[in-house]
Image (cartoon, rainbow, N blue to C red):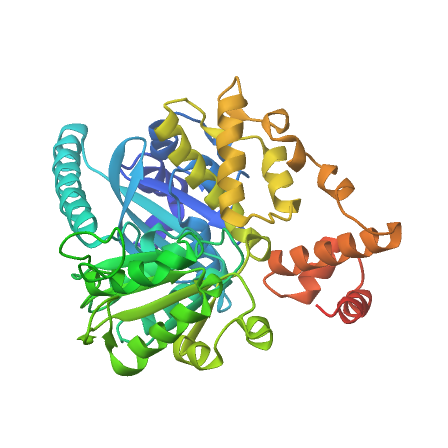
Amino acid sequence: MHHLADKYKEEIFETVFENAYHCFVVVNGDGLITYMNNTYCDFLETNKQEVIGRHVTDVIENSRMHIVAKSGKEEIADLQYIRGNHMIANRIPVRSDGEVVGAVGTVLFRDTKEWKKMNSHIKDLLLELEHYRSQLNNQHGTTYSLHDIVGSSPQMNELKNKIKKVSPGDVSVLLRGESGTGKELFAHSIHHLSERSSNPFIKVNCAAIPEHLLESELFGYKEGAFTGAKKGGKLGKFQLANGGTVFLDEIGDMPLSAQVKILRVLQEGEVEALGANDTQKIDVRIIAATNQSLEKLIEEQRFRDDLFYRINVVQVQIPPLRERTEDLRVLSKYILSKVTKRSGKRVIDFDQTVLDCFMTYQWPGNIRELENVIESAVHLTNTEIITLEDLPDHIQPNSYILQQNGTLKEILNNTEKQTIERSLNKANGDKMKAAKLLGIGKSKLYDKIKKYGI
């Protein structure tokens, strides 16, 4: 047998890999394709010359091969949607001398008739599942789950793991992060994973409700409580959320008068409607979110410190987009798919120069700004590929540098600091690798890190 394998090695390889029913693909540690068999190339309607050396996400829809090549964790029998069909994918990390150097992927299917039958069955089940999920979400007020949060950077993986840990309990959670980072998505995810998921999720935007109406919106009112009060009164957000979760978005904008009552809910588990003579027991979990420094607001006596300690039992810091540039490629393609489905316009990809531009831009508006930029580009482009010319003026290369205020030295220092931070993020904190990316020595990089306090 050993002799046979040696003698007919090429023939065996060709039979097993090239002419098999299964699709095979191999990527290196950077997620670049090093091999793809004929079956996969035929299925994707491409050829080996076009795919070898390209990043796997540019060739295969919804691929996770690059993630397995980084994490070293195998993924078996994973459902993957490719070219309008649901496939069964296996992804196995490849190791050499104990280190992960790449990954091998297989996509499993049988003959066309059998697969079409199986695919129809799976689609039917998924549509049924989505129908029930949609009904449940409409009933209880949640739209998103952890699966809707796109990103596999170390920061996002760590954040998702933290969410999974804190969700099951009733502990109050404070979500902190810049505007547009997706704090509401995380609030929905916590509720979905909690024991309260079958009960209501009620959102309160503390900045959108006028101060004189905030207390009645939160705690309700009795009939005749004030001029214009509805007959029979009205339940407040807390009463509506009884047994579930209240999400207090932009809590830093809540007036002090309402903060006192929120504190009472947390301490005593009861609310008092406007015009009521007694209190009502209530059972809710509090998730709060802010893009402000609550500590600074406390110093300015605009936020109660005792309320801060109550809502800040577990703090979750959501990183801005510029600190997780590894997620930009997959996030951009996810948003592009979502925008094109909504608009009905056929735009399938980004030119590489656009992705390079995305990697260097600072994204002050975070994911919300990225969505706006991609939606604008989809409507402006005349081709199936978004190019630099399709992007808004403010994101064009070098234009955002001109928008910075300060002296030439300050602008140069700021640009150098941002470039070093991006390189460190791209290298996952590996300073040797970051120094190579920057084309400088390790000692010089350490000097720069110390200089800018990175």
* Snapshot quadrant of residue 198: bottom left
Quadrant where the C terminus lies?
Answer: bottom right
Q: Quadrant of the N terminus?
A: bottom left
Camera-nearest residue between 359 and 100? 359
Q: Is residue 46 visible?
A: yes
Report how many numbered discs are placed on residues in the image: 0
Q: What residue is at 56 percent from the left and 47 percent from the top? A: 365
Image position of 69 (left or right of 286): right
At which x and y percent is residue 126? 17, 42
Q: Which of the pair 278/394 is nearer the observer?
A: 278
x and y, in percent, of residue 197 in the image: 20, 62
Q: Is residue 64 left or right of residue 192?
A: right
Closer-to-camera residue (232/423): 232
Q: Give above or below for 248 relative to 397.
A: below
Q: Specify the quadrant of the image occupied by residue 259.
A: bottom left
Q: Is residue 253 above or below residue 63?
A: below
Q: In this rendering, would 439 be left or right of 300?
A: right
Residue 205, visible in the rendered structure = no
Instruction: Please give the name of the residue rendered at 51% of the width and 37% of the height, measured from the top-left corner.
Output: 372
| 209 horizontally vs 193: left or right | right
Image x and y of residue 143, in percent: 28, 49
User: Residue 132 location in percent, x, y?
Assistant: 13, 46
